[in-house]
């Protein structure tokens, strides 16, 4: 066993309850297949005073994706045999459909179906059934980029995989998971529980924070394939031990899941078969996070160092941040906070790229950093010696009022132009999206502009619209059926030669370029 600094790991572990305040949590670090640090704290149910334990079942949310892909790889020697079967689930799709491998690698270009629930008027706490999922995915006619060219997170990719696996094997995904994955890996209590309204075993997830207080989260969605597995810390430890025990098997499940993938242009991809690929100071890491209202989890695996980290919360603290701290302590690569370089105020403001149809907002943040809003959640960026702003996933290079945005892992570049101005208020009215058979309603109420989505899932609540230019608006969406929510929707007004409003283009990082026509 290569030596690790056990004292450093233990120090981080002891501090987790203080640094990530909330009802409860569990965490573990494994080295060479052995647990070298473990922590359990707090309550699984605060009202009933049920303590958290290493046996407490919790939703692992999107960490489920790697297990769905593991079943897929274990059930089909060649997953491309399912390519043609995808047609039945995308009956109105126009053009060339994505391949099954594109779904596994989040390169399909299919818009995220949880973002589309917002478009279809869903109540964040409303019910969403398996039939709703089938109906929603069946509406999709197009992708928001050519399959295989970029990365875009899409939960629907894995929901479709679950449909295909069950159809072609004639068995439930739950049964296949237990037989092919959980039993061989020694995950004794893990299972697929698609109904999020109740957690098996009775653990409770909490919304809120230490300042505002914690309240039990309400979830009523049915999910499968993209999420749905509940597992205990002991189950997840068993998974990491299975990964280590099979590390030398060239055809071992985890080695197959974590093999490097590429885009059509040959550039390396950031995602494979339900696994993110990241680096901590040159050390290659695979893993995934998971989120549902009231729950957060994260697992990391460093194959070369034979290190694994698991963190699970029954609140909405940063499981990613906690797991990164533990992994860095285990690797002996603490994150060094560099002295902040000054940021020219000329960076701040709003920018827009007409190609991807998305906006970028930059504002000052504490400690000399920059607060950037582009994807689902804000990113903190640091000024570099070369004059660029960088976060772990994004780089910005500025030339006057133009910013070149690069998200290398996603194979995405965008030429963002500064925008400003007071929004024209003649956009009030109803707009229809033919692809989703859904409406967007915009109203002027006193001095404010408000908008809402409507569709087969209901009438969404009115939300404030904020102008960032004469014909570009932002519609914040920080709460959806899934977590995290879509973030800011960028609403772009389309006009005819006379200047009359004819329609809108609406999109967010998860679901870009949806066309709406004025009714």
Image (cartoon, grey):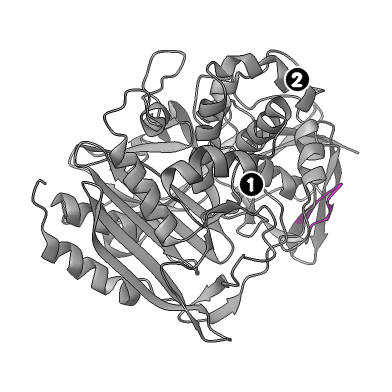
Q: Residue at x 79, y 67 (%)?
A: 446
Where residue 101 sits in the image (x, y, percent)? Answer: 54, 22
How many numbered dots are placed on residues in this image? 2
Where residue 334 sits in the image (x, y, percent)? Answer: 16, 55
Q: Which mark is residue 171?
A: none
Where residue 177 sits in the image (x, y, percent)? Answer: 57, 41
Residue 111 as seen in the image, left or right of residue 414: right
Answer above or below: position of 486 versus 519.
below
Give the structural element (helix, strand or loop) at label 2. Answer: helix
Q: Is residue 14 magenta?
A: no
Q: Is residue 458 magenta?
A: yes
> Mark 2 or mark 1, which is nearer to you?
2
| Residue 42, picture quadrant | bottom left
For disc 2, the neighbor class at 10 Å (few under 14, some 14 to 19, many from 20) is: some
Answer above or below: position of 248 versus 425.
above
Mark 2 or 1 closer to N-term? 2
For disc 1, the neighbor class at 10 Å (few under 14, some 14 to 19, many from 20) is: many
Residue 20 as seen in the image, left or right of residue 106: left
**In the image, which residues are magenta?**
451-460
Give the structural element (helix, strand or loop) at label 1. Answer: strand
Most foreground residue, 167 or 142:
167
Q: Residue at x 58, y 55 (%)?
A: 483
Where residue 343 sits in the image (x, y, percent)? Answer: 28, 51
**Residue with the mark numbered 1:** 489
**Residue farthest right in this picture:** 519
3D distance between C-alphas at marks 2 and 1: 29 Å
Judged by its main secondary structure, the magenta piece is strand
| Residue 199, picture quadrant | bottom right
**Residue with the mark numbered 2:** 87
């Amino acid at each position: 066993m290569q030596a690790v600094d056990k004292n450093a790991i233990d120090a981080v572990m002891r501090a987790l309850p203080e640094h990530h305040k909330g009802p409860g949590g569990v965490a573990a670090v494994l080295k060479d297949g052995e647990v070298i640090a473990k922590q359990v704290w707090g309550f699984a149910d605060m009202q009933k005073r049920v303590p958290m334990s290493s046996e407490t079942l919790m939703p692992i949310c999107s960490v489920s994706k790697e297990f769905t892909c593991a079943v897929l790889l274990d059930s089909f020697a060649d997953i491309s045999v399912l390519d043609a079967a995808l047609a039945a689930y995308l009956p109105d799709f126009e053009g060339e459909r994505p391949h099954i491998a594109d779904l596994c690698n989040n390169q399909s270009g299919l818009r995220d179906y949880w973002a589309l629930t917002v478009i279809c008027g869903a109540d964040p706490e409303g019910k969403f059934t398996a039939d709703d999922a089938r109906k929603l995915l069946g509406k999709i006619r197009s992708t928001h980029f050519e399959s295989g060219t970029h990365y875009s997170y899409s939960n629907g990719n894995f929901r479709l995989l679950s449909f295909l696996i069950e159809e072609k094997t004639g068995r439930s995904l739950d049964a296949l998971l237990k037989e092919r994955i959980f039993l061989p890996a020694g995950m004794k209590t893990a299972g697929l529980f698609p109904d999020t309204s109740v957690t098996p075993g009775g653990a409770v997830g909490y919304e809120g924070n230490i300042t505002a207080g914690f309240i039990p989260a309400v979830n009523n969605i049915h999910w499968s394939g993209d999420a749905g597995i509940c597992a205990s810390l002991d189950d997840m430890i068993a998974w990491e031990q299975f990964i280590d025990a099979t590390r030398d098997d060239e055809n071992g499940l985890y080695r197959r899941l974590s093999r490097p993938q590429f885009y059509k242009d040959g550039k390396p991809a950031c995602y494979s078969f339900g696994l993110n690929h990241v680096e901590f100071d040159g050390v290659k890491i695979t893993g995934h996070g998971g989120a549902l209202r009231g729950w957060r989890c994260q697992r990391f695996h460093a194959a070369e160092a034979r290190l694994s980290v698991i963190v699970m919360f029954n609140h909405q603290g940063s499981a990613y941040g906690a797991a990164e701290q533990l992994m860095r302590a285990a690797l002996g690569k603490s994150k060094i906070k560099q002295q902040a370089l000054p940021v020219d105020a000329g960076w701040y403001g709003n920018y827009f790229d007409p190609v991807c149809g998305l906006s970028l907002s930059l504002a000052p943040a504490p400690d000399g950093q920059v607060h950037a809003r582009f994807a689902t959640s804000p990113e903190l960026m640091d000024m570099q010696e070369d004059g660029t702003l960088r976060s772990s996933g994004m780089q910005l290079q500025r030339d006057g009022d133009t910013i070149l945005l690069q998200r290398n892992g996603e194979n995405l570049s965008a030429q963002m132009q500064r925008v400003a101005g007071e929004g024209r208020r003649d956009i009030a009215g109803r707009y229809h999206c033919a692809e989703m058979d859904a409406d967007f309603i915009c109203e002027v109420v006193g001095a404010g502009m408000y908008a809402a989505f409507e569709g087969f899932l209901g009438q969404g609540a009115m939300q404030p619209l904020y102008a960032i230019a004469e014909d570009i608006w932002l519609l914040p969406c920080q709460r959806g059926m899934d977590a995290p929510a879509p973030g800011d929707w960028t609403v772009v007004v389309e006009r005819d030669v006379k200047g009359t409003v004819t329609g809108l283009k609406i999109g967010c990082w998860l679901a870009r370029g949806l066309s709406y026509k004025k009714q």
